[in-house]
Amino acid sequence: MTPMSIQMTDLQDLYLEQLQDVYSAEQQLLEALPRMAQAASSAELRQGFELHTQQTQEQLRRLEQIFEALGQPPGGKTCQAMRGLVAEGQEMTEKKANPAVRDAGLIAAAQRAEHYEIAAYGTLRTYAELLGRTQDVQLLQASEDEEKATDQKLTGLARSINMEALG
């Protein structure tokens, strides 16, 4: 049975479907982050994107652990929301803009993706709690905490970069 043909009859089915969605989201972001880092003119922003690339790799490993415990293969679904968010970030990397303005736009695009991931991990953590999947809760909480920390770092960077973009 392919993931697309799974009939969702209970929270366990929805949990699996949502795990597949966030796995796809993380894979897409993993491809986009190096391009965003390359487009950033701020060394601090570039380093932030590079760090988040490493975190995303670890988040994918955590998700793979969960899939393994569920006896399910990862993937099988494309996260359409992240596809759109990545496309918006890609547009920003290609714009002809003042470097500080581009950096401010990259931060905006990155924060949209972070907020999506925070929501996804929070929802999954709640499902895991309800399903009694204690190990999954810990893994999902670790990823949610990293996403929140990244969002806070981006907010801090935005304060100075947005002032530069005011020009």
Image (tube, rainbow, N blue to C red):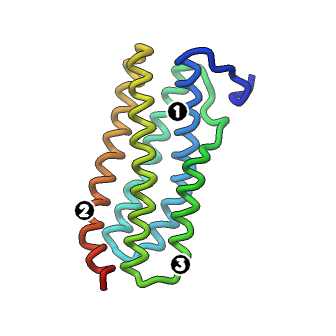
The residue shown at (60%, 44%) is 79
Kindly indicate whether the residue at mark 1 contacts the one at mark 3 (C-beta within 8 angstroms). Answer: no
| 135 vs 155, nearest the viewer | 155
Q: In which quarter of the image is the N terminus?
A: top right
Q: Determine which of the numbered discs, if any, sits on residue 156 in the image.
A: 2
Residue 3 percent location from the top left of the image: 68, 28
Residue 14, picture quadrant: top right
Residue for badge 3: 95
Label 1: few (<14), some (14–19) or many (≥20) C-alpha neighbours in 10 Å: some
Question: Residue 1, relative to residue 117: is it above or below?
Answer: above
Q: Give the residue drawn at x 44%, y 15%.
A: 131
Q: Which residue is drawn at 42% across and 73% down?
A: 40
Q: Which mark is residue 142?
A: none
Q: Which residue is painted at 52% across and 18% down in the image? A: 11
Name the amino acid, label 1: Glu
Q: Is residue 156 left or right of residue 5?
A: left
Q: What element carries label 2?
A: helix
Check disc 2 and give the amino acid type: Gly
Q: Mark 1 points at which residue?
A: 64
Q: Position of residue 72 (x, y in %)?
A: 61, 24
Instruction: Name the secondary structure under disc 1.
Output: helix
Q: Look at the picture and state if 2 lies above or below 55.
A: above
For the residue carrying disc 3, how many other residues have a C-alpha within 10 Å: few (<14), some (14-19), or many (20+)?
A: few
For marks 2 and 3, give the CA distance: 23 Å
Which of marks 3 and 2 precedes in the sequence?
Answer: 3
Q: Return the disc, 1 or 2, that comes first in the chain's sequence.
A: 1
* The furthest residue to the front: 166
As measured in the structure, the alpha-carbon distance from the residue carrying label 3 to the one carrying label 1 is 36 Å
Whole-angstrom CA distance, mark 1 to mark 2, is 31 Å
Q: Nearer the viewer, residue 12 or 42?
A: 12
Disc 2 packing (10 Å; few <14; some 14–19; many ≥20): few
Which percent across, then down, holds residue 129? 38, 19
